[in-house]
Image: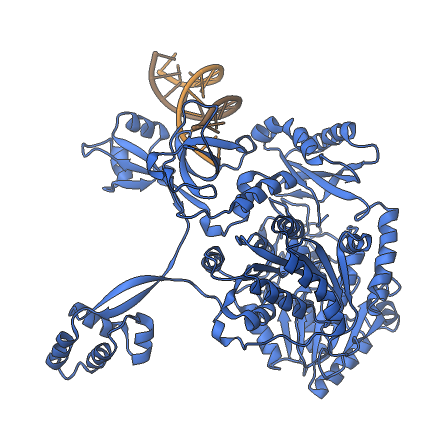
Chain colours: A blue, B brown, C orange
Amino acid sequence: MNIAKVIVDVPASSINQTFDYQIPERFQEMLKPGMRVMVPFGPRKIMGYVVGRTNESSFDQLKEIIDVFDLTPILTTELLDLGKWLAEETLSLYITTFQAMLPQVLKANYKKELERLTSASLSDQLEAFFDRRDVVPYEEVENSGVSFYQIQKAIQDGDIAVHYLVKSRVTKKHVTFLKPARDIHLLEEALRDMPNRARKQQEMLTFFIDHPQEIELNKLIKEFGTTRSTVNALLKKELITSFRKEVFRNPYDDSVFEQTTSLELTEQQREAIEPIKQHIQENRHDVFLIHGVTGSGKTEIYLQAIQDVIDKGKEAIVLVPEISLTPQMVKRFKGRFGSNVAVLHSALSYGEKYDEWRRIHRKEVQVVVGARSAVFAPFENLGIIIIDEEHENSYKQEDQPRYHARDVAIHRGEYHRCPVILGSATPTLESYARAQKGVYKLATLTKRTNEKAMPEVNIVDMRDELHAGNRSMFSRNLKENMEQRIRRGEQIVLLLNRRGYSTFVMCRECGYVKECPHCDIALTFHKHQNQLKCHYCSYEESMPMYCPSCSSDLIRFFGTGTQRIEEALTQLIPEARVLRMDVDTTRRKGAHEKLLNQFANKEADILLGTQMIAKGLDFENVTLVGVLTADSMLHLPDFRSSEKTFQLLTQVSGRAGRHDLPGEVIVQTYTPEHYSIELASRYNYLRFYQQEMQTRKKFQYPPYVFLTLITVSHQNHVTAVQTTQQIVKNLWKHVQSDTVILGPTPSPIPRMKDRFRYQCMIKYKHESDLQRLIQKMIHQFDDEVRKNDLQITVDMQPYQLM
DNA sequence: CGCCCCCGCGCA
DNA sequence: GCGCGGGGGCGG
């Protein structure tokens, strides 16, 4: 087994295969599949993943592995197989799936340098270029006055050499420690000799005499209320020494979490958890769907199931949608399992993520709570995988590899023979339909653990408001209720459903709308910088004074961003203290938590925000939830728009009156008769499910069919259309008779970054080998992709159709 | 003929 | 993804 099979770090379809390398004697013993290696590839050096070892190769002249980056495999054999499966399933490259399973810092960093080999004088230009340095980064060749030709020549003459560097981006955090450098009696001697004015030094030295153990530099300085200079003085006298030690970054101080113990379960909870516990005991795989209303105690079921898994010596993965609900979730998991929990979510720095990942990798924890990619946690003894808020969009990755965490979880659950739990108050139609068919095991929690009724939902017809002459964003009902709550010292959550309502700029005179010159999309107005920005290509320009089309000065921004609502709100109810929560106010690290804490401390009456406030928040003093525009996402060209509206309204209603105070919800809409709004107001999921299933059946959408979306983009409009057309034509020839292909149609954003985008959609029931078929199809365009900058992307289960 | 740019290929 | 090498264009 002296040959390694390697997937190299070159993201190109022609390289999407293993390459064989000779394993040098010195690595024979230690090299295992799942390790990263440095290999020669053509004239350069790159990183690769060893996926297997073998004795034979169809190539007779193999190159040798140059170096090994890891001491232990960073991908288990299970994850190597999973990566392969995922690449084939999602039509991605192997290298892409491997990278997606690992923390960012394990990716390679490439550098190219030029080294001067001779002391003899070079040409004037080269001398100027090297500027008395021996090694120069290769990028500097550009704009340096030295031609590539000259460099080539100098290399040939042996005067200079090119070096390729491959580095792991890993950064480890080090902390400086101090300890005495000499025997105690020598320190005592030095203390006696020390002049009286060196008070701080004396104190510190006394400390070291009493505590000869090592101590962290920063802690010491803090404790003595002094500066580094005191330490430096002692270091200079060689009385103490300093050394650096690696520490793991810990984004959460475990000691601050109050320990909790199992709660008594309700009858319904016990019924739901029983079969799960049994599966855990018997090492049996099945998918469970827990459909439980908000407040029905799903989390407690997760916690107790995980306790069983831990007791068996196995491990648990808990997926949560994203940062917005993580702080409270983290608290519950850390509270129950303490330092046995690793947390992986997008708000952590790369370094913090890496350290949390390593705690999993080193088997220092048994539980991981995290966002989508945590489904790849390198556990080897999984006992359960839980996906909370199963319906959330964020479980679908929207770039390569376009996977859904649910599918990966189920695949891993089968491998480890362990249960997979999907939990939601509003399951996706796909999951609920599977539960109805018996593919998933269904558990329903209809009662809240505190026996409280769900808050009452009042629908306000905004058309009536218009007729009554109220043209503001706030209905009279909502206004009165808000004022009343503020008077009573209670709090309010206001949801602005911003999607489809971005703040674009339009001329009131001629109707001209300012669009991005590179993308067919209206520019979004950002007030604080007075700038117009494109959300797709980050193009920006300043807000024009006059309409570029008719020169009128009546050019204004339209739409309703949270900023405008905030202004309108303070005008409407001047005494209201408003906290605004949106992408702008939560961009900075920790800003999210800070805002929520402010609100929890009652520093504001109203929390105003976008979708991000709909989920998981739990404030005891909130008694009113207002939804400003319930139907703003209802009319988007997406077959899931009703489902998303229902989910959002249900989620946000769950934010009111979770504790002693009764809650109320006011939903403003222009289409109160729509079933998703009406049924959400009555918390009737089942009815909604039935009604929506009828619609899906009628128009043949999931879960009745599967979807695949192929998008083609090119600078040339005609090429984009024609290529899509060819793909459609080819597909028709090979698909089953009940399969339908729609298109070509322009993408919802027909032009982005100066490229035209066309798409086609495949709707099918039985296509056992669609991936292979599409792969072959795309293969025909390989040449065009390569030299003509054609792009074809495939999404096997599109979520965002727009 | 020498110099330079561009394209296509192959990488184990 | 990227460096190489061959082909071709161009100036002398």
- Closer-to-camera residue (A80/A106): A80
Q: Classify A552 as above or below A183.
A: above
* Left or right: A449 in relation to A195: right
Q: Quadrant of residue A692?
A: bottom right
Along the viewing direction, whichever of A126 and A666 lies nearer the viewer: A666
Number of residue marks:
0
Residue at the (18%, 32%) spot, across then down: A120
Quadrant of the image occupied by residue A779: top right
* Rendering coords of residue A725 (x, y %): 74, 31
Q: Residue at x 61, y 28 (%)?
A: A782
The quadrant of the image that shows the N terminus of chain A is: top left
Asked whether residue A12 is in view, the answer is: yes
Lateral position of residue A216 relative to residue A483, left or right: left
Q: Position of residue A96 (x, y in %)?
A: 55, 42
Identified at 45% across, 23% down, the residue is A59
Q: Is residue A502 above or below residue A564?
A: above
- Image coordinates for residue A506, horizontal then vertical, percent: 71, 56
Residue situated furthest bottom in the rendering: A488
Rendered position, A26 above or below A780: below
Q: Is residue A514 left or right of residue A643?
A: left
